[in-house]
């Protein structure tokens, strides 16, 4: 297959979407399985009552709390995933890079947890508006996360942050694991294409503690596009 | 007949707590572990008729845990649970030595059927080991 850069971007975007979908649906299925078992247990208890066996009200309270917890968890995941899916609505618009990045980090956290790696996004109330494709930015951040997760081990840490620096929005991904990622690395080539599509730049370097730092720089929105 | 002994291994505490309660109400003796390494320690301390292990767990996944458990104790009967069963995962699960591969949410009666099957397998394997030991003793000792 002899695809152009745009075809390759589309294909890798589809893979990114599919990877997150698989992870999110797995999380949702886990929550639903617990609700399913809790419903089954309620049925068991009801059958017991039918046979004259009393129920300790605390057991019912525990079950209700369990179901509530899983429903809240499921709704939160669904809302985050819905927001992510809507990031594809418009190819170009003004958006808050902090909110979109935070949402992506939350959706990707399970993938880090499976490797016992802590993926963090420190609380940030700042709004940093940029213009372009929110999906492309999330794809870029996810590409960096996947790259460092490949080499991360139990106990490693990844911190993602978004700040306004001068006339730019700077997304930093700082990982405690060190990874070699030259310009010819497929992930870095992809990152380069994505940042180009956002009229931004990227930088990957080893930090003093032996870890890896990614920096994605995008121009701030200057009145173009419409806020979501 | 003694109760069947089962070890549930899953990092979702709400899942193991609920399923354990349902299995216990059906006369099964249930212990719970939240990860693979802890399950390996548990199996060293106590004999189980079946282990029910989640495939996707942080750190050591269900496939790796099954391989390690069976390396130490080849007669163990492992049932793997997964959120989304695919052919590839199913092949991986059975190749790892698991006797069964069930999709979540698992029907409790189906799971109990598999636990009973696991227990029967274990009894047969134990009897076979005893027979082999006796045959070996009779063959090697000069009585």
Image (cartoon, coloured by chain):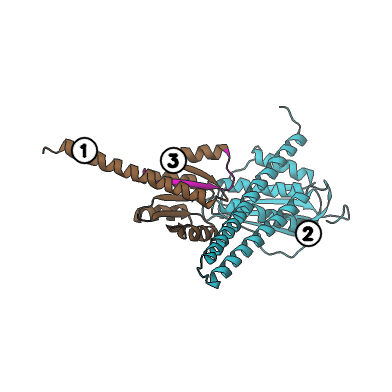
Chain colours: A cyan, B brown
List the residue tagged with mark 2.
A128
In the visual, does A30 lie left or right of B71?
A: right
Horizontal and vertical percent position of residue A130: 81, 54
List the residue tagged with mark 3.
B97
Q: Nearer the viewer, residue A36 or B83?
A: A36
Horizontal and vertical percent position of residue B15: 54, 58
Rendered-image quadrant of the N terminus of chain B: bottom left
- Whether residue A170 is situated above or below residue B64 in the rendered picture: below
Do labels 2 and 1 touch, CB within 8 Å?
A: no
Q: Chain of mark 3?
A: B
Label 1 crowd (10 A; few <14 / some 14-19 / many >=20): few
Do labels 2 and 3 touch, CB within 8 Å?
A: no
Report whether mark 2 lies on the same chain as mark 1: no
Q: Nearer the viewer, residue B36 or A8?
A: B36
Residue A207 visible in the current orientation: no
> What's drawn in magenta, residue-wise?
B74-86
List the residue tagged with mark 1.
B136
- Whether residue A222 is situated above or below residue A193 in the rendered picture: below
Report whether mark 2 lies on the same chain as mark 3: no
Q: Nearer the viewer, residue A65 or A3?
A: A65
Sequence-wise, the earlier of marks 1 and 3 is 3
Do labels 1 and 3 touch, CB within 8 Å?
A: no
Residue at point 24%, 41% (across, down): B133
Magenta-drawn stretch contains B76? yes
């Amino acid at each position: 297959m002899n695809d152009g850069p745009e075809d390759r971007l589309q294909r890798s975007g589809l893979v990114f979407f599919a990877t997150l979908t698989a992870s999110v649906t797995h999380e949702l299925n886990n929550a639903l399985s617990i609700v399913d078992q809790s419903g089954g247990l309620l049925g068991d208890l009801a059958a017991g009552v039918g046979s004259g066996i009393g129920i300790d009200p605390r057991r019912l309270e525990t079950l209700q709390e369990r179901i509530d917890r899983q429903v809240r968890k499921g709704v939160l995941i669904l809302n985050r995933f819905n927001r992510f899916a809507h990031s594809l609505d418009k190819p170009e618009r003004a958006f808050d890079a902090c909110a979109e990045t935070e949402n992506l980090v939350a959706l990707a956290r399970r993938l880090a947890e499976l490797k016992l790696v802590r993926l963090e996004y420190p609380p940030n109330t700042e709004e940093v508006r940029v213009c372009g494709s929110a999906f492309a930015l999330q794809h870029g951040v996810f590409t960096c996360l996947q790259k460092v997760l490949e080499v991360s081990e139990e106990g490693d840490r990844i911190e993602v942050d978004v700040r306004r620096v001068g006339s730019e929005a700077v997304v930093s991904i700082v990982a405690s694991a060190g990874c070699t990622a030259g310009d010819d690395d497929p992930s870095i080539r992809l990152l380069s294409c994505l940042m180009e599509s956002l009229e931004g730049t990227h930088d990957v370097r080893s930090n003093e503690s032996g870890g890896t730092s990614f920096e994605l720089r995008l121009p701030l929105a200057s009145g173009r596009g419409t806020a979501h | 007949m003694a109760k069947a002994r089962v070890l549930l291994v899953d990092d979702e505490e709400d899942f193991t707590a609920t399923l354990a309660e349902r299995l216990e109400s059906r006369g099964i003796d249930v212990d719970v572990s939240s990860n693979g390494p802890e399950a390996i320690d548990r199996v060293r301390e106590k004999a189980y008729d079946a282990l029910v292990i989640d495939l996707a767990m942080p750190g050591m996944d269900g496939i790796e845990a099954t391989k390690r458990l069976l390396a130490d104790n080849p007669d163990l009967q492992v049932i793997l649970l997964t959120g989304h069963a695919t052919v590839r995962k199913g092949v991986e699960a059975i190749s790892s030595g698991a006797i069964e591969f069930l999709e979540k949410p698992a029907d409790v009666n189906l799971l109990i059927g598999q636990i009973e099957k696991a227990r029967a397998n274990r009894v047969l394997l134990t009897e076979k080991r005893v027979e082999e030991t006796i045959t070996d003793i009779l063959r090697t000792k000069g009585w």
